[in-house]
Image (cartoon, rainbow, N blue to C red):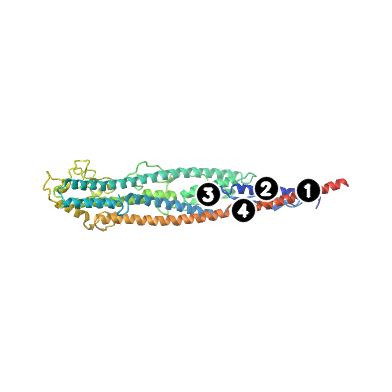
């Protein structure tokens, strides 16, 4: 080999060493940077016509796409499970557990006990007042649960709107990055940082809606949901959703009172577990708004209906007409089974008895339609009232599954069902969280290993010193020739 060839080889080695040192340093500095893909210098021997040596082919971004895809789906599943778990936790906190202070079952038991106490001493006005008070506390509990459920639906609706905005912004940003990457794909410019940014954006999209990444020419990617919808394959689509500030029990997607989601003006199915947008955080909020909260409201309305209708029995209080409101009314009027939806938010104690109305609690003893107070020792109506509350009968509300029992049995059954669903949701969240953690650790294991990068830096340092020594040796040879 000629002296010039040896010098050329050493210089090519120094160039490759310098590039390797730069890339290794970048890896070390970004070891904890989200979305960063480990870089590796690709080297090759110099081709024919040269003196040999080494050349830098390029810098590769090393990521495990299969693991990233698994981690993204696990992230979406975890977000979906988290939404359901949070909902049932809030619902259990609202209704309370059977026997728990302030729970729906405790409010009903307190009303029942107050009727027993009043029947034992019907002449004591304070016991009649207590019965009226506990009846009002029971209706207030129905109101609180119902209003909060509709508030949770409105919160879910607002979160859907926010997620749609984030999706549109992220998809537009990914489209811009696709365009930029494609434009500089075969130029010396570095596209690896752009790919890092794009990975982070895709991660954000994937948590909201599970997506599959499809590679296209010139470094471009397309995004398809697991349900088959095209989120990005060329120009970014526009997803539209109209927020509903206030939601009431009767408002549903099917009735047109609530907004659905459209992609480029075309409505898509958001009601199915296997729909185009199913499986992620967005689907979790849609599930709360359109299924979980309405189902809980339906059961609550069924309990309120059962309470009202038991006191509308004509044989119970003969002082009222068939069209008059009974002890529990629907905003002052008699409850009508055709208006069951949302009744839990409207149920009231009859104004003749309530503290905000006439507050004539003696009518609990003598009849709501009585002209004047009767025999203070007559407890027959109070006993019938208590019997109506505890009598075993088949539930009229379809949401109570035609069960038989006293009202307390129906309440305990609904609360137990909610606790079971919460337990199932919590178990699913635990599984999904473990799954996500496992894939995240696997992804990190494939990323930057600081120990390995330090070892690489030491090798680069040794190689750099060897090439520098070669140049020094060549210089000494040339100096020797010049002295001859």
Residue at the extreme right: 484
- Circles 3 and 2: CB atoms closer than 8 Å: no
Q: Residues within 10 Å of mark 4 (few under 14, many from 20)?
A: few
Q: Is residue 180 above or below residue 309?
A: above
Question: What residue is pinned by disc 1?
Answer: 472
Question: What residue is pinned by disc 2?
Answer: 19
Camera-nearest label, 2 or 1 = 1
Q: In the image, what residue occupies the spot 29% across and 51% down?
A: 104
Question: What residue is pinned by disc 3?
Answer: 222
Distance from disc 3 to disc 2, alpha carbons, whole Å, reads: 32 Å
Label 2 or label 1, whichever comes before in sequence order: 2
Camera-nearest label, 3 or 2 = 2
Dot 3 falls on a residue whose secondary structure is: strand
Question: What residue is pinned by disc 4?
Answer: 451
Distance from disc 4 to disc 3, alpha carbons, whole Å, reads: 35 Å
Q: Residues within 10 Å of mark 2 (few under 14, many from 20)?
A: some
Q: Residues within 10 Å of mark 3 (few under 14, many from 20)?
A: many
Residue 401 location (% of width, % of height): 29, 57
Dot 1 falls on a residue whose secondary structure is: helix
Distance from disc 4 to disc 2, alpha carbons, whole Å, reads: 19 Å
Distance from disc 2 to disc 1, alpha carbons, whole Å, reads: 21 Å
């Amino acid at each position: 080999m000629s002296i010039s060839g040896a010098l050329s080889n050493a210089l090519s080695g120094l160039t490759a060493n310098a590039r390797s040192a730069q890339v290794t340093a970048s890896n070390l500095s970004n070891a904890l940077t989200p979305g960063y893909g480990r870089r590796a210098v690709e080297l090759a021997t110099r081709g024919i016509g040269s003196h040999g040596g080494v050349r830098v082919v390029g810098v590769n971004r090393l990521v495990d796409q299969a693991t990233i895809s698994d981690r993204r789906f696990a992230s979406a599943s975890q977000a979906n499970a988290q939404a359901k778990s949070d909902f049932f936790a809030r619902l259990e906190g609202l209704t309370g557990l059977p026997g728990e202070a302030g729970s729906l079952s405790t409010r009903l038991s307190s009303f029942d006990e107050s009727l027993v106490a009043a029947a034992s001493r019907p002449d004591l006005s304070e016991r009649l007042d207590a019965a009226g008070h506990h009846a009002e506390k029971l209706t207030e509990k129905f109101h609180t649960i119902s209003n909060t459920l509709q508030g949770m639906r409105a919160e879910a609706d607002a979160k859907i709107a926010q997620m749609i905005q984030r999706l549109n912004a992220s998809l537009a940003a990914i489209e811009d990055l696709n365009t930029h990457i494609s434009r500089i794909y075969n130029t010396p410019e570095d596209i690896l940082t752009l790919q890092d940014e794009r990975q982070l954006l895709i991660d954000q999209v994937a948590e909201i809606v599970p997506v599959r990444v499809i590679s296209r020419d010139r470094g471009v990617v397309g995004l398809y949901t697991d349900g088959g919808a095209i989120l990005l394959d060329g120009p970014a689509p526009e997803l539209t959703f109209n927020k509903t500030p206030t939601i009431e029990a009767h408002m549903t997607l099917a009735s047109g009172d609530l907004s659905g989601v459209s992609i480029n003006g075309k409505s898509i199915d958001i009601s199915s577990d296997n729909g185009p947008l199913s499986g992620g955080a967005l689907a979790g909020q849609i599930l709360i708004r359109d299924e979980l909260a309405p189902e809980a409201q339906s059961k609550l309305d069924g309990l309120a209906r059962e309470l009202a209708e038991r006191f509308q029995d004509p044989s119970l209080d003969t002082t009222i007409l068939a069209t008059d409101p009974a002890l529990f009314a629907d905003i002052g009027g008699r409850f009508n089974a055709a208006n069951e939806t949302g009744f839990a938010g409207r149920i009231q104690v009859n104004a003749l008895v309530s503290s905000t109305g006439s507050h004539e609690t003696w009518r609990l003893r003598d009849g709501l339609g009585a002209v004047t107070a009767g025999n203070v020792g007559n407890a027959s109506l109070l006993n019938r009232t208590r019997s109506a509350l505890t009598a075993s009968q088949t539930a009229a509300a379809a949401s109570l599954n035609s069960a038989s029992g006293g009202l307390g049995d129906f309440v305990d059954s609904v609360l137990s069902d909610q606790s079971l669903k919460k337990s199932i949701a919590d178990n699913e969240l635990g599984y999904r969280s473990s799954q996500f953690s496992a894939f995240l650790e696997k992804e990190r294991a494939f990323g930057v290993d600081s120990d390995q990068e330090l070892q690489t830096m030491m090798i680069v340092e040794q190689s750099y010193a060897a090439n520098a020594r070669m140049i020094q040796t060549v210089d000494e040879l040339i100096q020797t020739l010049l002295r001859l």
